[in-house]
Amino acid sequence: MKLVLTPGPAADVTQAETLITDVPFAVVIADRGYDSRDVVRAVEARGGEAVIPSRATNTVQRPIDRERYKDRNLAERFWSKVKQYRRVATRYEKTGRNFLAMLHVASIMVLLR
């Protein structure tokens, strides 16, 4: 697992390449926020399959494996559990470094269950 902390208004797609760097994968499952030709090319260049639905505004819709896309639910449930930790949900930490550390601690607690 890799966590990257960004400023609030930053788009998800800006960190896609950072998230897949140095991580072995066969499939990348992401939501529409990561729909970009550059992201799909980067995933396919590393030998993986991009299961990222196209945005509704795209004229050409990329076909995806719907059954495999259902596995994204695992990530959604994980983040739901991490947000149950009050220090994460309310962002008590004042610095980005401390907040990221708290995210790591909460993630470890969720994964140990």
Image (cartoon, rainbow, N blue to C red):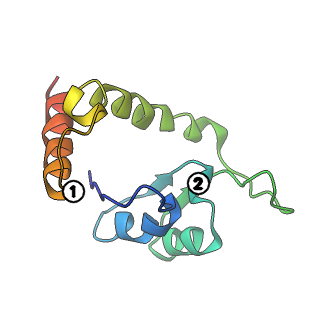
Give the label, 1 or 2, closer to the camera. 1
Classify residue 80 by image quadrant.
Answer: top left
Q: How many other residues sit within 10 Å of disc 1, few (<14), some (14-19) or many (≥20)?
A: few
- For the residue labelled by badge 1, is the local secondary structure a helix, a strand or a loop? helix
Residue type at numbered disc 1: Gly
> Furthest-right residue in view?
59
Residue 51 visible in the current orientation: no
Residue type at numbered disc 2: Gly
Q: Which mark is residue 96?
A: 1
Q: Which mark is residue 1?
A: none
Q: Which mark is residue 33?
A: 2
Q: Is residue 66 above or below residue 39?
A: above
Q: Position of residue 39 (x, y in %)?
A: 54, 69
At x 31% / y 30%, what residue is drawn? Answer: 83
Among numbered discs 1 and 2, the one appearing first in the sequence = 2
Q: Position of residue 88 (x, y in %)?
A: 25, 36
